[in-house]
Image (cartoon, rainbow, N blue to C red):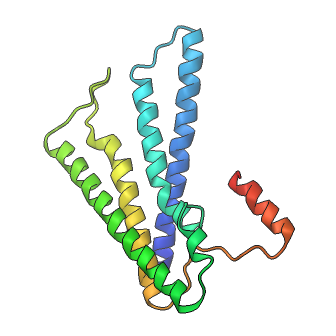
Amino acid sequence: MIRRALDGLYLGAGWLAGLFMLAIFVLMMLLSVGRLVALNIPAGDDFVAWCMAASAFLGLAHTFRSGELIRVGLITDHIKGPAKRAVELLCLVIGVASVGFFAWNAVTLTWDSYRFNDISQGVIAIPLWIPQLGYSGGLVILFIAFVDELVNALMGGKPRYEKEPPATAEELVERAMQSGV
């Protein structure tokens, strides 16, 4: 039950990141077409920037779990046996500590913005804690994903973020095309 909830959390954050990307597209189109027809969208650039930050941070956990996040695979792929497991555990511990540090500070920043009633300086006054939720929420979900993987690795499980090596040359080419390489 917990596994399904966590996988749902990562997938939901990924879908939310995709919706923010869609919002960026719609806003950019409205801003571009608006210039042609003399339609002004107040603070449109601010909304696009906030959507971009939310999209980037909310997509991190899903990207990590899908094995698409840049990581130290270039090193760990060449290590075998118990040494590989030790290096994986070390990397996960460093990842948990790093992401935990950033998540804690992001949540603190968002909470302080709420407490002090910080308002955006753009054309439309928006409480800053609202757009900061995407940033801090995304980092908290990434932290959960790292802790999830660390617990899995400590219990002897195979890292779920690693993909199986391609079996054929066609599969290698297909993966490269899907990743945009």
For the point 44% across and 81% down, the residue is 89
Classify residue 171 by image quadrant: bottom right
Out of 35 and 143, give the one closest to the viewer: 143
User: In the shown orientation, is residue 50 left or right of residue 7?
Assistant: left
* Location of residue 146 in the rendering, given as x and y in whole percent from the top left corner: 42, 71
Q: Position of residue 110 (x, y in %)?
A: 25, 48
Would you say 56 lies left or right of 117 here?
right
Q: How many marks?
A: 0
**In the picture shown, does residue 128 fall above or below 7?**
above
Residue pushed farthest top?
38
Residue 137, position as x, y percentages in the image:
36, 55
Residue shown at the point (23%, 32%) measured from the top left: 119
Residue sitting at the far left: 116
Query: Can residue 67 be spotted in the picture?
Result: yes
What residue do we see at 56% from left, 31% from top? 26
The picture places residue 81, in percent across and down from the top left corner, at: 58, 91
Q: Is residue 77 above or below residue 128?
A: below
Whether residue 12 sits left or right of residue 132 in the image: it is right
Residue ID at (45%, 91%): 155
Q: Is residue 1 visible?
A: no
